């Protein structure tokens, strides 16, 4: 499940910007940028911002699908929410809806896109009247709140640690440390196979 945080802050003006750099794959130099982002004004005082980092063969498609789900459902799920807990529950519904939607799509061979592909998701709802930032995330796309060069908050990445390795082994899989494109990480795999090689403990899709 997505993890949620409620933070209090003051906000007189909101400026947004986005920058994305495609990941580098040594085995596929023309790798497609798999990042998506969303800034959605829900009301005069409430804004949803989210990032989606796809992975796997269809990661660029998967991240876009989740973005569209958030765009369509967020006005009702969190834009119309009355309380902070309503927003938390609304964010959970968005994450669940995105995950369900990914199960509907298949590739040219009829295999689910989410079989070997998925996406991180980190979302935050800013309310300038209440002075709150309510966030939820799955995966390792970090959210940080910084003031005067000081980090006030940073989300905790869903890394593949010892607890995750034990849970994966209990389900019949295994965690293997591998180096891909110069990055060494512990990855979730089927036993005896390098696939899917997921380098995080949670994600939408796979």
Image: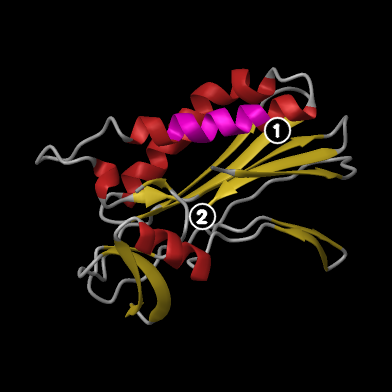
Element assignment for label 2:
loop
Which mark is nearer the camera, 2 or 1? 2
Q: 165 and 30: which one is in front?
A: 165
Q: Are marks 2 and 1 in contact (CB under 8 Å)?
A: no
Is 41 above or below relative to 9?
Answer: above
The percent coordinates of residue 59 (x first, y second) are 34, 51
Q: Position of residue 71 (x, y in %)?
A: 52, 28
Which stretch appears magenta? Answer: 89-98
Q: Position of residue 128 (x, y in %)?
A: 84, 34
Q: Residue at x 41, y 73 (%)?
A: 186
Which mark is drawn over residue 47? 1
Local packing at callout 1 (Cα closer than 10 Å; few below 14, some 14-19, many 20+) is many
138 lies left or right of 151 = left
Write the residue at 54% across / 30% down: 94
Where is mark 2, residue-wise?
A: 139
Against 69, is 56 above or below?
below
- Residue lying at 88% horizontally and 64% vertically, measured from the top left: 148
Name the residue: 20% across, 70% down.
192
Query: Which element type, helix, strand or loop, lies under badge 1?
Result: strand
């Amino acid at each position: 499940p997505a993890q949620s945080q409620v933070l209090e802050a003051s906000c007189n003006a909101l400026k947004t910007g986005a920058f994305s750099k495609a990941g580098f794959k040594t085995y596929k130099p023309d790798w497609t940028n798999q990042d998506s982002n969303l800034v959605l004004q829900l009301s005069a005082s409430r804004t949803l911002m989210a990032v989606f980092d796809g992975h796997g063969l269809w990661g660029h498609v998967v991240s876009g699908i989740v973005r569209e789900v958030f765009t369509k459902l967020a006005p009702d799920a969190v834009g119309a929410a009355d309380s902070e807990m309503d927003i938390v529950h609304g964010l959970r519904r968005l994450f669940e809806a995105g995950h369900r939607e990914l199960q509907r799509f298949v590739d040219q061979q009829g295999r689910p896109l989410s079989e070997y592909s998925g996406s991180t998701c980190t979302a935050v709802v800013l309310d300038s009247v209440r002075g709150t930032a309510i966030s939820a995330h799955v995966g390792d796309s970090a959210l940080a709140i910084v003031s005067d060069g000081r980090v006030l908050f940073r989300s905790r990445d869903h890394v593949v640690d010892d607890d995750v390795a034990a849970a994966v082994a209990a389900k019949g899989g295994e965690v293997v440390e591998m180096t891909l494109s110069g990055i060494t990480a512990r990855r979730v795999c089927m036993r005896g196979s390098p696939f899917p090689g997921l380098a995080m403990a949670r994600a939408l899709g796979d």
